[in-house]
Every structure is written in structure tokens, then in C-alpha cells.
Image (cartoon, rainbow, N blue to C red):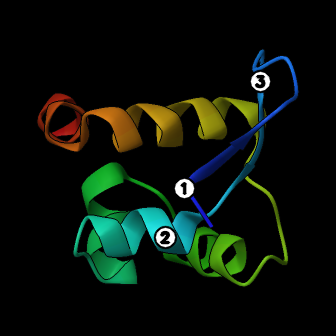
Amino acid sequence: MADFEFSENARFVRNVNVRALRERLGLTQEEFARRYRFPLRSVQEWEQWRKRPAPGTMTLLLAISRDPKALAKALA
């Protein structure tokens, strides 16, 4: 599965595969959570598909997917 699944008209993100994104970046759950200021428990729940990220969080995850270094720098 790709990192993101978009709606038919691509106006919004329908789903995000946080594990695929994190693994593509070569980070552990702890590193990913710390670098992007997410609660570790949230990252775990997203990866296990128990919870979906909120819409604003999906936007942040999409930005991380597109330019992870810039987001990490902005949050440092």
C-alpha cells in the first residue's frame, strides 16, 4: 500500500499508512514520534489501524511524506 490513499476526486486524503511512511523514512516508532512531535501511543494506534489520524494530522503526515527534512527542521 502506498503512503496515502486519496478520494476519487483527490480533494482529500481518505487513508494514510503511517507504518509505510515511517519505514520509508527509516525511523523507529519512537524516532518518528519524537521527530514530528506525535504521541508514541498515537503512532502505534495509527499503525495498527485502531485509530485514524485527525484531518489536520493527515495534512501534516502528507507534508512529512513530501518533504520530511523540511518538516523536521521546522519542528526542531
- How many residues crowd mark 2 within 10 Å: few (<14), some (14–19), many (20+)? some
Label 1 sits on residue: 3
34 displayed left or right of 33: left
Callouts 1 and 2 close, C-beta under 8 Å: yes
Give the mark, 3 or 1, whose residue is nearer the N terminus: 1
- Say which quarter of the image contains residue 25: bottom left
Q: Position of residue 70 (x, y in %)?
A: 16, 30
Label 2 sits on residue: 20
The amino acid marked with disc number 2 is Ala
- SS at mark 2 in the image: helix
The amino acid marked with disc number 1 is Asp
- How many residues crowd mark 1 within 10 Å: few (<14), some (14–19), many (20+)? some
Label 3 sits on residue: 12
Q: Which mark is residue 34?
A: none
Q: CA gap, disc 1 to disc 2? A: 6 Å
Q: Is 27 drawn above or below residue 63 in the view shown? A: below
- SS at mark 3 in the image: loop
Count of numbered tags: 3
The residue under the point 66% across, 30% down is 56
- Image quarter where the N terminus lies is bottom right
Give the mark, 3 or 2, whose residue is nearer the N terminus: 3
Give the mark, 1 or 2, whose residue is nearer the N terminus: 1
Q: Position of residue 4 (x, y in %)?
A: 62, 48
Q: Position of residue 63 (x, y in %)?
A: 41, 31
Q: Is 47 drawn above or below residue 69 in the view shown? A: below
- Say which quarter of the image contains residue 50: bottom right
- Image quarter where the C terminus lies is top left
The amino acid marked with disc number 3 is Phe
Q: Position of residue 73 (x, y in %)?
A: 11, 35
The residue under the point 75% across, 33% down is 55
35 displayed left or right of 14: left
